[in-house]
Amino acid sequence: MNVSNSRREEPPKRGRAPREPKEPREKAKHPILRALGRTLATLICLGIMVCSLAAVAAVYYAVQATANDGNLLDLDNIELSQSSTVVATDPDTGAQVEYATLRSSNSHRVWADLEQIPTNLQYAFICTEDKDFYNEPGVNFKRTIGAMINEYLLPIYSSKQGASTLEQQLIKNLTSDKSASGVEGALRKLREIYRALCLSRAYSKETILEAYLNTISFTGTIQGVQTAANEYFNKDVSQLTLWECATIASITKNPTNYNPYTNPENLIHRRNFIMYNMWQQGIISEEDYRNGAAQPLVLAEEDTNKKTSSVTSYFTDALFTEVVHDIMDKEGVDESTAQSMLYTGGYTIEATVNPKMQTAMENLMLNEGDAYFPAGWHEEEVTSISDDDVQVMNADGTPKTRTGDDGTVYYYRNVRTQAAMVTLDYDGNVLAMVGGLGEKTKSLSLNRAYSVTRQTGSTIKPIGAYALGVEYGLVNWSTMLNNSPLYQKQDMVIRDEDYCRKNGLMGLSDSQLKAYPNAWRSWPRNYGGNYGDGSDLPLWNGLARSLNTIAIRVGDLVGASNIFNFVYNTLQLTTLDPANDVGLAQMVMGSQTHGVTPTALAAAFQIFYDGEYTTPHLYTRVLDRDGNIYLENNATSYQALTPQTAYIMNRLLKNVLYSNVGTASGRYPNSSGMESFGKTGTASDEKDLWFVGGTPYYVTAVWWGYDAPYDMTNTLGKQQAKTRTCVMAWKAYMEQVQANLPYKAFPTSDGVVERAYCTQSGLLAGANCPSRATGYYRADDLPDTCNYSHSSGVAAAQSADTAPVVGQDTTGLDTD
């Protein structure tokens, strides 16, 4: 081919020579657009800088906030978590025996290796909770960003979105870092993301999945798939079928809504949804899905018995609370962390409980057939009804309700009288405790013996006014005191609240109220409303009869502030109110703001053994899993009263039971001739009834009333609602637990002597005293000898000093 012919050169054109090309000029921009562009560029740069700083700050915060995680996320060690064991001393052999187990599941945690856990169970969780588990770095950023936009910026979804991976859920289980709203919710999510990233880098997916499946929570206190398999299907986890795997994986979404015992239909729908997910993600076949979905929900038959047997005693509940608080103090951690440590730390707790006494008390407090504590029922108004409540219904079967002025709906429930009992020895060891009547159905339920305060009524008289009166040498056994009010109406000291309320005088000051003589009243009254007969009575008689008129005069001598300081600081009745309880009414009559617990009150009566007080406690030591001492109880012991005062008070309180004028006359336990002492107590309007009794072995407090204070005479009548109910329960219990104990006497004191005294003057009997009785006195503080000429009053004096009771009818002697 002739290339030259195919591409020929054209001859040059004639004409004007070409001009030199000019440099192109930029097209002019509008000044406003130029300014906007610069502003936008600046904002973008600032945004990048702010985001960078925010990112740095977020990382710094996350690092600092998680710096003290310690072993919380150590997956190599969580397999070693063990339930803690409570041991007690067998009273017959003296050997240590297992009494209870503190655990967060209904059986000891049994760790299941991943190889034991069926693949279907593993993927039942993965397919529904975190389908990208094996492909993500511990956090699903796409879902997280979407959830955060929905939560904090723009509600792009109709409901709150979950974005937690299995790593993040495991972190929640291990750290209890679960705050979920507002700024704290965002910070919690930031901490969680950082921890998840760290966890994913440190451990394999298999290790993380194994830890997750062994720590996840189910209904009640069940934790871990092995425990769940045992609980729900009575199987080892390795034996679970497909539908059983899906069932277990369903419960964790919402243990209440998907509870297999209470909401089986909800659970079946959730179970089938999980198997559908597994089919759609290729884990199981369509046939497997359809066969599994057709299965009925069949649970292990013995589940009910398991749940019943796992309920802890009132003693164990109180012990758990005490040890948790001591761990909090020792480690400086919050309550949730301390509970987790106790549940999984493998501790051995050496408890003070006497198993035989605990069982005896539990059996008595079952109160079968209302054998000891009558059932007084009344309606109580509440704003919500729980599953345990006995709801009041209308005749047509609808709930009885009332709507308040503010729109609040009030419901009604029937409530009955309740009771509590607790026994200590004189070293402060709590030996038995029951915080309610009837069968206990829940662990960590309301413990009226340990954690509920009540007004003491007259039970405070001996531990305050009388004990200090004798200790300070202000009064003695036979000091004569006038049986009349400390303040008369004409003294205008004590307001008559009822009169003032009815006549619109409540707002007046005391000085303004002086113009209204009827706005005042005499004070105090004795039980039953009388103001005494104006006679002089020996101190022992006033205490035995629990006369307020006598006790107030002793309290006035001692001083209300001295009594408060003693019972609050020395006897550790720290639930009393320092601002409102420093008064004679509170410190002698027992009308405190809150009152005290039965445990604290029983501990206060220890001082009538030998004068020593020991802080009540439920354990002696806590050992770690290696047998080392981890905790020792922080009880303190000291002499609260001199042994002389303690012995005199012991003899005075004996009269409550053994004198025929005592408020519990004749109701002492028949225990091999062993003596006992005690004190009854009644709060205003019979809202709280008490008895605290002591024997040479034990001191026991018994309380009876309603959970919400209510006058028991409205439901039981005046003859039933008496302190003798508490006394007779104590008597029956003591006769049982002391049946086989050897005889023991209360300790005496060398500094106390018995002397005859004149029943008219209260002084030591002289040669001319026609009526005498025996009393107990401090040898270094004896009364003078009576040298009066006794011309009258012998019969009256004799009636005030009566011999010990011998088998008489005492049913009408409740004068407290």
Image (cartoon, rainbow, N blue to C red):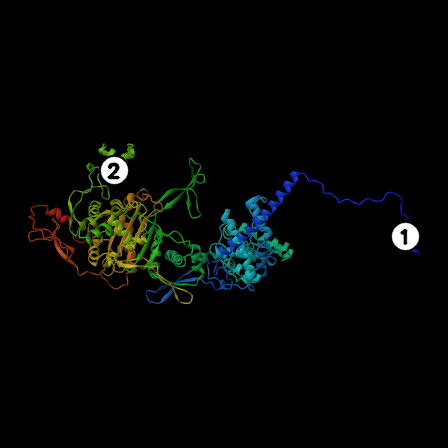
**Measured from the top left, where is residue 608 in percent x and y?**
24, 56
Which of these two is toward me, 721 or 355? 355
- Which residue is at 72% across, 41% downward? 27
**Measured from the top left, where is residue 759 in percent x and y?**
12, 50
What secondary structure is found at the residue carrying circle 1?
loop
Residue type at mark 1 is: Arg
Which of pointers 1 and 2 lies earlier in the amino acid sequence? Answer: 1
Bin the neighbour count of mark 1 within 10 Å (Cα to Cα): few under 14, some 14-19, many 20 and up.
few
Please identify the quadrant where the N terminus is shown: bottom right
Residue type at mark 2 is: Arg
Q: Does the rendering let one see residue 181?
A: no
Query: In screen coordinates, is 496 left or right of 234?
Result: left
Tell me: residue 293, above or below residue 97. above
Give me the disc on residue 495.
Answer: 2
Which of these two is toward me, 240 or 782? 782
**Measured from the top left, where is residue 75 in percent x and y?**
51, 62
Q: Which residue is mark 1?
A: 7
Which of these two is toward me, 811 or 142? 142
Bin the neighbour count of mark 2 within 10 Å (Cα to Cα): few under 14, some 14-19, many 20 and up.
some
What secondary structure is found at the residue carrying circle 2?
strand
Q: Does the rendering let one see residue 568?
A: yes
